[in-house]
Amino acid sequence: MVVDTEIAGIAVGDAHPVRIMGVINLSSESFYKGSVTDTVHVIETAQRMVAERADLLDVGARSTWPLADTISKEEERRRLIPALELLVDAVDVPISVDTQFADLARESLELGAHIINDVSGFTADPAMVGVAREFSCPVVVMASETIPGDPLGMDAVMRSLDTIIRNSEDAGISPDSIIIDPAIGKWLPEKAPKYDFETLDQLERLKVFGKPVLVAISRKSFIGDLLNRPAAERLMGSIAATAIAVYKGAHIIRTHDVADTADAARVAEAIRGRRIICEGSGYSIEVLDVVNTEDAPGYFAAIGATGTGARIMKDKTVLRVLKITNVTTTEALIIKQEALSRGCDAALPRDAVSHETQNTDLIVMGTELQLKRLASKLEGQARDLPVLSGLILSALQRFRNTDYRYG
């Protein structure tokens, strides 16, 4: 679904440039010491980021790194509020405040901050949603269930964000004010890099929510684990991941390295191209990017289709094309016949159709539902067709196997 909204006066969405959010880090406990600033240098840091093409600034005074020392809320306030007092009149871009506490968010908004960035997704402080509603401000909500960033895997991220969005809108937050964050990073010990790889690779799944997507990827641990580099040496890894995030549909990139990230974003969005929408005579057609059948019910619900209908139709939304090698010509012809009878199709070489060869390869294409029905039919047949049935089902299952694809 098309994203086109305004966040604190800035146009954000599919038809607009990717926005860069510079990180103003006031936390000495941060995992990346090179990003830390203090009140004395905060204006200099902010103005440099704006000159480097930051569209927004995100100010935070508490490290969310799991290994960081815990600080009190009063210490967070002591760092945050004086910096905001300096910043609100020193830069002409929207300021986001990165906090999980409602009273700190309120004080920040009263000073002139524009956006709440709550990495707990409104789960840490129940009063936060009331502050957001009262000020009618944009909110960044990160995928979280009981603690920030705890969903493991993209399916869990999708469920978490769906719940947060529903609860937020039910509580009176404007749908146009919600920005979603898929929680990339090692938020808890058991969150292995494979989960972040999967999230980035499947980021386009977030389009079903119709919300701006913020990706906070800069110098995070999955890059360090993969490259065996400390945070200070992860810039190029961050740039590579940023380009993929933008290509997959991110609208806002939160970064410590504004200038380099802005360059990467411009190139990636140029390669990504436009979403396909055709309009005329009061009608419009939008090409939906459904890559996982579990997301399809969200698109159906958006047009008012029933839940029962969505469950029946979802496996029809994703087409798979499978190449099967070294089957006998007889088996290939049986597969093609059974595929056609279930709405699939299969491509075979001409010499296989005329029985001029003993073994052949073929390409089978169909929706996941059609291919599952084909596999079910082959499972009860002779020759090695039951073996091929199992391989077809295994191939379909591996699209959702995090360990197989990213482990």
Image (tube, helix red, strand yellow):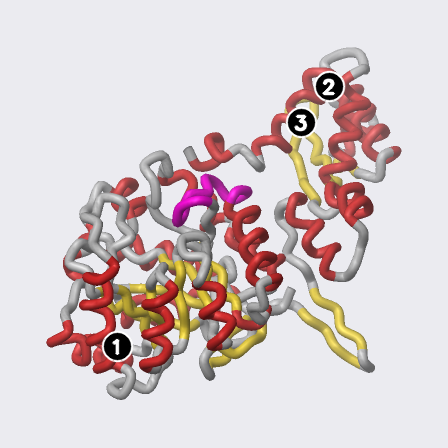
In the depicted structure, whether residue 376 falls above or below residue 121: above
- Residue at image coords 20%, 65%: 26
The residue type indicated by label 3 comes to Leu
Say whether residue 402 is left or right of residue 361. left
Q: Which mark is residue 190?
A: none
What's the CA distance linking mark 1 and mark 3?
A: 56 Å
Residues at marks 2 and 1, CA–CA distance in whole angstroms: 72 Å
Q: Nearer the viewer, residue 156 or 238?
A: 156
The residue tagged 3 is: 393
Which span of residues is magenta-colored?
A: 146-156
The image quarter in which residue 32 lies: bottom left
Give the side of residue 400 with respect to residue 218, left or right: right
Closer to the camera in the image, 73 or 198:
73
Residue 307, percent across and down?
A: 77, 48
The first of marks 2 and 1 along the sequence is 1
Q: In terms of secondary structure, where does tag 3 sit?
A: helix
Residue at (75, 25) in percent of width and height:
375
Q: Amino acid at mark 1?
A: Leu
* Residue position marked by numbered label 1 in the rendering: 84
Who's the residue at 76% across and 42% down the image?
A: 311
> How far across and how far down the image is residue 353, in percent?
81, 29
Residue 155: within the magenta?
Answer: yes
Mark before the other along the chain sequence, 1 or 3: 1
Tell me the element at label 2: strand
Magenta span contains residue 148: yes
Kind of element beneath mark 1: helix
Residue 334 vertical position relative to residue 401 in the rendered view, above or below: above
- For the stretch drawn in magenta, what is the main secondary structure? loop
Would residue 259 be found to the left or right of residue 19 on screen? Answer: left
